[in-house]
Image (cartoon, rainbow, N blue to C red):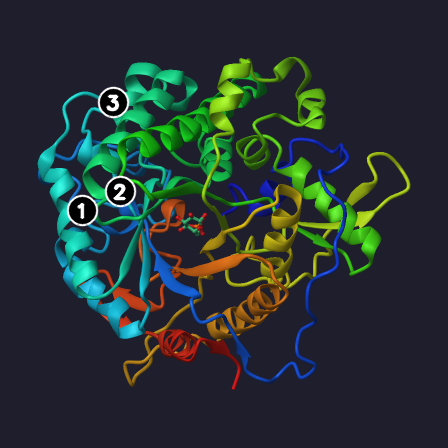
Amino acid sequence: MSGKFSRRQFAKLAGFSALGLAATSANAAPKQKTAADPHAPARFPKDFRWGTATSAYQIEGAVNEDGRGRSIWDTFAHTPGKIEDKTTGDRANEHYHRYKEDVGLMRDLGVKHYRFSIAWPRVFPEGTGKPNPKGLDFYNRLLDELLAKGIEPYATLYHWDLPQALQDRVGGWQSTDTSKAFADYAGYIAERLTDRVKNIFTLNEAGRFLNFGYGWGIDAPGLKLPNAELNQARHNVVLGHGLAVQAIRARGRAGTKVGPAENIATCVPAFDTPENVRAAEIATRELNSGLLSVMLEGKYTDGFLEYAGKDAPKFTAEELKIIGSPNDFVGLNIYAPQFYIAASDKKPGWSVLPFPASFPHMSADWLRIGPETIYWAPRLAAKVWNLKTIYITENGTSSEDKVHADGKIYDLDRIMYLRNYLRQLQRAVAEGVPVRGYFLWTLMDNFEWIYGYEKRFGLVHVDFETQRRTPKLSASFYRDVVTRNAIGA
Ligand code: BG6
């Protein structure tokens, strides 16, 4: 990331408490050991769901078409100095018009599942009030196209593009009015789309958009709130999640499944001893205490409240009940190890070890290479919160992709990253960790937020001048994994 900010800092700051408390459950041995030969093909269960993920503002473009309202990301991207290459998502991948071609790319990959996001300001241009039927129609067309091609849609309701009108009127997530407006929007979508969308993710990465957008001013809306106000905004966000879960259950078709998609603060035992594993469980609960823990437990941990002190959010018992509304699944976005954890004799019983400067990373410096993260994060989360269904809702990497003279893109570093992470994912699944599916980030290069078009995360290369899509070598790699439902030959 640019000199402005690095996710290394984020890794340090993501945990709200240096204190650890007793986790909810004891350490358990994994069900089954992995195959002795690390090179043998490692199979996934036959109903494992393979997919790709995208988000609306990053690909749709068409920001002024068919009555779409402005979002905080339109405003932010158009503010000088905010986006590294001075671009915006105005045009992006023109997916709004090219969605059929893009669904075709998925079909060619062989994936049968697709996680996309709905742009709230397309559906409610003012955030609340009068819906815009033309906005919703785009998603109707997209869903019909996906289903016609045999691809199951998973909708995310909020991938950071808050209607600007809500930011202007009530201060966005600083107000519970936004939590309530989010629930109304969620209910409206549930009423109209759950005939075809059976799985809904409420919020994408609350941990990112709050810290970056409301805490450090790096993402939209670019605020730097003091701690007490930031904690209150966090509370309003998790309240919005809980209210949305309830609205979807009340207004969606019976059987609609719902849960969050969170960039869990990823903990990894420094090395595998029972003591370190236990310490990593406790750390997982504490370092996710302001968001995932409260969503899954319906209470803030004592450690969180103690650490926040006078800056703790104000809340009622009724709100905690809403926030803790049961989810059907939890989505985890997993890119890199954030905390290596060791057991400690001192309170709170665990410590975070410092990263050596030589720790390897991908082309983005925040994207450290730690394949074991995709094994440990779901294993620890399942243990701590007794989860029964987990989806890896994002995993992938940017690469310095270059189109060679033969027109091909040999993104071998992406393949290296993916094959190692997928091996570890298979290990988790084989040991009984309840991961039911994997959505690779991302289908095609897109508008990468503050990086603009400089960072490329796609399996498919996009020439943003011509909008030509070219599958990279990693697309062949992923197609092979999906087709054989296995990693390794
Ligand atoms: C996740 C987001 O944080 O990571 C995606 O959910 C994003 O929307 C991806 O594109 C990569 O992040 P970044 O900061 O490198 O653009």
Q: Position of residue 466 (x, y in %)?
A: 17, 64
Q: Secondary structure at mark 3?
A: helix
At label 1, counting other C-alpha atoms closer than 10 Å, the crowd grade (few under 14, some 14-19, many 20 or more) is many
Residue placed furthest toward the right:
345
Residue lying farthest to the front in this orientation: 254
Give the amino acid at mark 2.
Ile
257 displayed left or right of 14? left
Please tell me the numbered disc located at residue 118.
2
Mark 2 Cβ inside 8 Å of ligand 1: no
Question: Residue at point 17% right, 58% down?
Answer: 99
State left or right for residue 355 relative to residue 67.
right
How far apart are the two marked residues, 2 and 1, measured between alpha carbons? 7 Å
Q: Quadrant of residue 63?
A: top left
Q: Nearer the viewer, residue 226 or 46?
A: 46
- Nearer-the-camera pick, 27 or 294: 27
Q: Is residue 310 above or below residue 204?
A: above
Of residue 374 and residue 370, the one placed in the foreground of this image is: 374
Marks 2,1: beta carbons within 8 A: yes
Please, is residue 224 above or below residue 383 in the view?
above
Tell me which numbered mark, 2 or 1, is placed earlier along the sequence. 2
The number of numbered badges drawn on the structure is: 3
Q: Position of residue 375 (x, y in %)?
A: 62, 61
- Name the spot of residue 100 as percent of width and height, x first: 15, 62
In the rendered image, is residue 3 in sight?
yes
- Residue picked out by circle 3: 165
Q: Is mark 3 within 8 Å of ligand 1?
A: no
